[in-house]
Image: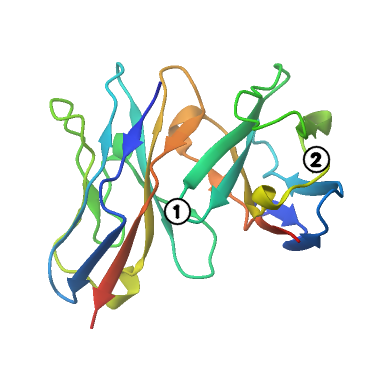
């Protein structure tokens, strides 16, 4: 596609439920990232996929968070047993190389009630 | 650890006045630095990269290795510049970006 696509754009879920957030990066971009954007907290790195290498999961805040990237393209971020503090905008980005900067998706706004 | 510091959460200037959004980074070899902008109800987008030495929408940013700074400047602010601005850096040999907490620029008509 022409840009990074994320779905759903908004998700409201009850505390304790699991959610899946999807990211479809730009075709040919080898690197894919997930960030979390909270009010006043800026962008918090979550996880990074680069080609066929093992993902860098160092930013995941707890073992309730996991992500996978199938076939080097689409990625899914899963949050299990959601908590209210998980409420945030989850951003996905992709890039073809280090000096190009990221192209971001429009994000998924997650609200846990 | 990589750090990016944007000391101002909010910056208000009058239309036509000069703008400088500050960014300092932790020293580590040769960093790659970027500015991103997020306009109201729009997605985060790349504004400029230090490596390309470009001017976008009248904004420029110069890398000062001695002061470890990458301040964003524009000589005459416009109302449409009102947005959230994030400074970011890539670590040595890494694609991952570390972002500052952002500065909200408000241009007063």
Q: Residue at x 79, y 31 (%)?
A: A68
Q: Which mark is residue A105?
A: none
Q: In the image, residue B2 lies at what x, y percent?
A: 39, 25
Occupied quadrant, residue B19: bottom left
The mark nearer the N terminus, 1 or 2, is 1
Whether residue A1 is visible here, answered yes or no, is no
Q: Which mark is residue A40?
A: 1
In the image, residue B78 above or below residue B25: below
Quadrant of the image containing the N terminus of chain B: top left
Front-most of B103 and B31? B103
In the image, residue A92 above or below residue A70: below
Q: Residue furthest bottom?
A: B109
Front-most of B99 and A24? B99
In the image, residue B26 above or below residue A103: above
Front-most of B62 and B25? B25
In the picture, measured across the screen, residue B16 lies left or right of residue B80, that is: left
Q: In the image, residue B22 lies at what x, y percent?
A: 22, 47
Q: Which mark is residue A78?
A: 2
Q: Residue furthest right?
A: A17
Whether residue A17 is visible here, answered yes or no, is yes
Disc 1 versus disc 2: distance between alpha carbons?
24 Å
In the picture, measured across the screen, residue A44 lies left or right of residue A12, that is: left
Q: Residue at x 51, y 29 (%)?
A: B96
In the picture, measured across the screen, residue B86 lies left or right of residue B19, that is: right
Label 1 crowd bin: few (<14), some (14–19), many (20+), radius 10 Å: few
Q: In the image, residue B42 lies at what x, y percent?
A: 53, 66
Q: Chain of mark 2?
A: A
Does dot 1 land on a helix, a strand or a loop?
loop
The colour scheme used to paint the residues is: rainbow
In the picture, measured across the screen, residue A48 lies left or right of residue B78, that is: right
Quadrant of the image containing the C terminus of chain B: bottom left
């Amino acid at each position: 596609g022409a840009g990074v696509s994320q779905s759903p754009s908004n998700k409201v879920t009850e505390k304790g439920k699991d959610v899946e957030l999807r990211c479809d990066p730009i075709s040919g971009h080898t690197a894919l990232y997930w960030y979390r954007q909270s009010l006043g907290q800026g962008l918090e790195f979550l996880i990074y996929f680069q080609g066929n290498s093992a993902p860098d999961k160092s930013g995941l805040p707890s073992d309730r968070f996991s992500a996978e990237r199938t076939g080097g393209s689409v990625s899914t971020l899963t949050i299990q047993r959601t908590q209210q503090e998980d409420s945030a905008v989850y951003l996905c980005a992709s890039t073809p190389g280090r000096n190009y900067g990221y192209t971001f998706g429009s994000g998924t706004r997650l609200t846990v009630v | 650890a990589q750090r990016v510091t944007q000391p101002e959460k909010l910056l208000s200037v009058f239309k036509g006045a000069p703008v400088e959004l500050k960014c300092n980074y932790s020293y580590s070899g040769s960093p790659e630095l970027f500015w991103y902008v997020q306009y109201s109800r729009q997605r985060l987008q790349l504004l400029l990269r230090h490596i390309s030495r470009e001017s976008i929408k009248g904004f420029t940013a110069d890398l000062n290795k001695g002061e470890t700074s990458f301040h964003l400047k524009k000589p005459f602010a416009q109302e449409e510049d009102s947005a959230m601005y994030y400074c970011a850096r890539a670590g040595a040999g890494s694609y991952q970006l570390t972002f500052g907490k952002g500065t909200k620029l408000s241009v007063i008509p």
